Image: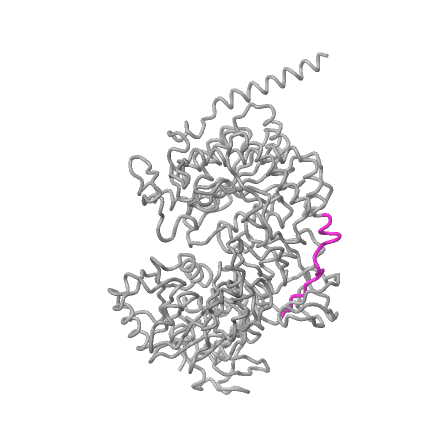
Amino acid sequence: MIRKLFGLLLILSSSFVLSIQAQQLFSPSEFLGYPLGTQFTFHHQILDYVTYISENSDRVSIKKIGKSYEGRDLVLLFISTEKNQSQLETIRLNNLKRAKLVDGNADATMPIIVWLSYNVHGNEAVSSEAALQTLYELASTQDPVKLQWLNETLVVMDPCLNPDGRDRYVTWYKQTKGIDANADPNSREHNFQWASGRTNHYYFDLNRDWAWMTQKETQARIENYSEWMPQVHVDFHEQGYNEPYYFAPAAEPIHPVVTGFQKTFQAEIGANHARYFDEKSWLFFTRQRFDLFYPSYGDSWPTFNGSIGMTYEQGGINAGLQVITETNDTLRLTNRIEHHYTTGISTIEAAVKGKQELEKQFTDYFKKSVEKPGGDYKSYILKNTGSESLQELVSFLKKQGISYEKAPNGKSVTGYSYFSDKNETYKIKTGDILVSSYQAKSNLLTVLFDPKPSLSDSVTYDITSWALPWVFGVETIATTQKMNGDGAVDQIDKKSISSVKNAQAYIFSWDSFTDAKFLADLYKHDFRMRQTELSMQINGIDFKPGAILILKADNIIQNPNYDSELVTIAEKYGVEIHVISSGYIEKGVDLGSSDIKFLKKPSIAVLSGDDVSSSSVGEVWHYFDQLLGYPISIVETSSINRMNITSYDVMILPSGNYNDVLNDKAISKLKEWVTNGGTLIALNSANNWMSKLGELSSLKRSEANSVDSNSVPGTYADRERNYISSSSPGAYFSTKTDATHPLAYGYSKGLFSLRLNEQLYEPLKDAWNVSTISKENHISGFIGSALKKNMKTNLIAGNEKAGKGNLVYITENILFRAFLYHNQLMMANAVFFVGQTR
C-alpha cells in the first residue's frame, strides 16, 4: 500500500513538474510577438521558435540535417515523452528491425513513428505556421489522452522542407502588402509573378524529387528518413484558394504494390479527419485528383517504403493573409492554420488508435518483401558495358537503400530486355550486377524498375513511365528467376592509368554524362582538347566517334605537368584514359588528321524572364551549375536588345513562349549572331518560336498534330478524358538515332526519350535529323490514343546550319527534373560539339 501511494505521489509530482514546464513555454504568438496567422513567419523565426522549444521542453529534441542551397538550416524535430526522448536511438533501431534493415526481432510494444512534413512548396506558406501551432500543442499539452499519444508514438516533424522558396514567397508578400492585407483577389499580393516561391533555389519542385534526390534539400531529407522509416507520413500542402480541404484516401490510379492495408488505413485516418471537419462544417473531399502512382511524391515514395503515405491539401495558394473566394467568403490564414493543425493532430490520434495493427502490418510488409516479394520480376541483371552509367545507377540504388551484388558470372538468364523491348537470353559476364527482389526495399525496387506500369485509370497526376534502365541508359534484363549473387560488389569505378611522360596523347571514350563532367573539369583546368569524328583503334581498343583526345603538343608548353594532373582529374570521376604512344594510329585516322578537330571552350548564355518556363530555366541552371560544373550566364530576354551577344558562342532557349518577349529588333540581332557563327539551342516548347524564324529555319510543326474532335468522346462529363486522348503525360519511346552526329555522340545504343508533350515536329528538310520517333517506338507509359494515331515520324533532336552558325532543335525536355541521366549527355553534346562542326 505504501509503495502504491509513493508511486502515485511520484506520478503527481512528475505531472506537477510537467505542468509548470508547460506553463513556462511561450506559444508561437507570445514568442514571435504577433498573433499566429496575422503575419507570415520568416524561416529564421521558425528556426528560432523550434530551437527555443527544444531547449525548454523535455518532450522535444532537434537535429540539424543539412542546409539549403542558399544556406538556410534544415532541421528535424523529435517529439515524444521524456522517457522516449531518453531512448531515441533504441526506438530508431527497433523500427529498422521492423523494416528488416537491421538484424534482430523488433519489440512490438515500442513507439511507432509518425512523420509530419511541412512546406515542401514555399508559397504554400500556411504549412510551417501550422507546424508551429502543432509543435506547441504537443510540447505543452496536459491532456492525459494526448500525453498517452506521445507515449505510444514518436512524432518526427520537418517544419520547413523548402526554406529558400518559403522566404522568397514571404519576402515578396511583405513587399507587396500594404498596411492591411487586401482581400481582393486581383490585388498584386495574390498574383506572384515569374519564378514563384513554390520552388527551391534552382526553381525545382521538391515534391517531385523524393525518388530522384537531385536537390540538396531532398538528399538530406531522404538520408534521415531512411534512418527512421516511419509507419505514417504526411505531406502538408495547399491548392487553389477556392478549393476545399483534401485528405486521404487517395485517388486512382494506385500502383499495384500498394497493399490493401495501406489503402484501408488511409481510409481510417480520413474518417477520423472527417469527424472533426463535420463538427465544424468544414468542406473537404477525398479519393479525387491526388493519386498514388508516380513514385517521387511525398505521399507515394513513403508508401512504397512501407508507410501510410498521404497528402493533405488546404485551399490557399496565393491567398496571402486573407482573400475573397468565389463563394464571396473571406479565407484567412488563421482558418488555414486551424485546418492543417486539426489534421495533424487527428493523424497522430488515428495512428495511436490503430497502433497494434499498424505495427503488425508494417512488420509483415517487410517480412514479405524479404521472403516472398511481389511483382513479376525477381531479379534484375545490370550489364557492365564499360560505361560509367552503371556506376551512376548503382550509386543511386545505394542512396535509396536498395541492395545489389555481383551477378553470377557465366550463368544464362532469360528475361525482358529493356533495350530491345522483348524477351532475350543473356549469358552473364564479369562485372555485371544482380539486384534481387528478395530484400527489404523490394516494393520500391519493383516500382522503380517497372517497365510497364499498370494504370487502373488513365487520368493521372504525373508521368506514367520512369524505369531506371531507361533513366540511366543501362542495359538490363528483368527475369522471373530467383537468383543468388556472387558476393558484395567491390568497385565498379574504372581505374585511370598512371601518367606516361613520353605519351603523345591520351584518349577517353565519350559514352556517359560522367565523361561530360570530366570534360567540363578539364576545361576548368585549362586543358586543350580535340575530338575524333571517326572511329579509331588504340592498342586493340575501339573508340567510337566523339572520343576525346588530349595531345601533348597542345598542352605541354602551358602546363609541363599536364599528364599527372590529367590522371588526378580522371581518378576523381572514375574515367579510364588510354595512352597513345605515337601519332601514327594502328587503325583509323592519325593524330594530325582533319577528322580530329580542335575543341574551342564555349561561352554560354541562357535566356530567362517573363513567358520563359521558370522550371526549364532552373533545370538548365542546375544542370550547368550543379551537375556539369560549367559556367553560364543567365540573361533576361528583355536585355537582348542592349546586350553585346557576340561574346557568347552558344545561346540556350529554355522552354517558353518567346513570341511576345522577343521583338523584331531582338530577333534580327539573334539571326545575325547565328549566321555569324553562333549556336542557338531550343528546348521543348521554345521550338515553336524557332519554327517561325522564316528562311533561317526549316523546322515545322507536324500537320498531323491536330486531333479530330469527332473521333473522341464529346460529352461534358468526358471532357478530361477527351483532353488526355491527345496528350502525352510522360511515356517512354525508343528512337532512331544517328550516333555519328556530334549531337548524338555517346548514343551508339540509341536514345530513350520520355515524351512529355503533345507537340509534334516534322523531320527537317536538307538538315540533320539526329533523333526521331514514331508511334511504333512506344515502349512504356500512357500516351493519348488520338495523339498516337497522328504520330508519324517526328523529330526529337536535329541540327541545321544557318550561315556560319547552327540551330539545334531538342523538342523534348531532356533535362526534366534533373533525373534523366541518360538524356543529359545530349545537352553537353549540343553546347560543346555542335557549334564546332564543319
Residue in the picture at 38% in, 39% down: 323
Q: Is residue 595 above or below residue 71?
A: below
Q: Nearer the viewer, residue 234 or 183?
A: 183
Residue 135, percent from left and from top: 51, 33
- Front residue of 402/205: it is 205
Choose top left, top right, bottom left or bottom right for residue 4. Answer: top right
- In the image, taking residue 767 as reference, residue 222 lies left or right, namely right
In the rendered image, is residue 72 in sight? Answer: no
Place of residue 835 in the rendered image (x, y in percent of width and height, measured from the top left): 39, 76
Q: Residue 154 lies in what quarter of the image?
A: top right
**Which range is magenta?**
367-384
Q: Nearer the viewer, residue 494 or 721?
A: 721
**Relative to 809, does residue 118 appear above or below in the rendering?**
above
- For the image, the number of numbered tags is 0
Judged left or right of residue 783, residue 550 is left
What residue appears at the point 54 percent right and 36 percent down from the top-left corner?
343
291 within the magenta span: no
- Give the position of the N terminus as an image quadrant: top right
Check residue 373 for magenta coloring: yes
Q: Residue at x 60, y 68 (%)?
A: 779
Give the colour scheme shown: one colour
Measuring from the top left, give residue 229's x and y in whole percent.
Answer: 62, 44
Please state if 262 lies on the left or on the right of 724 as rendered. Answer: right
Q: Is residue 580 above or below residue 452?
A: below
Q: Quadrant of the C terminus?
A: bottom left
Between 83 and 468, the residue placed more toward the observer is 468
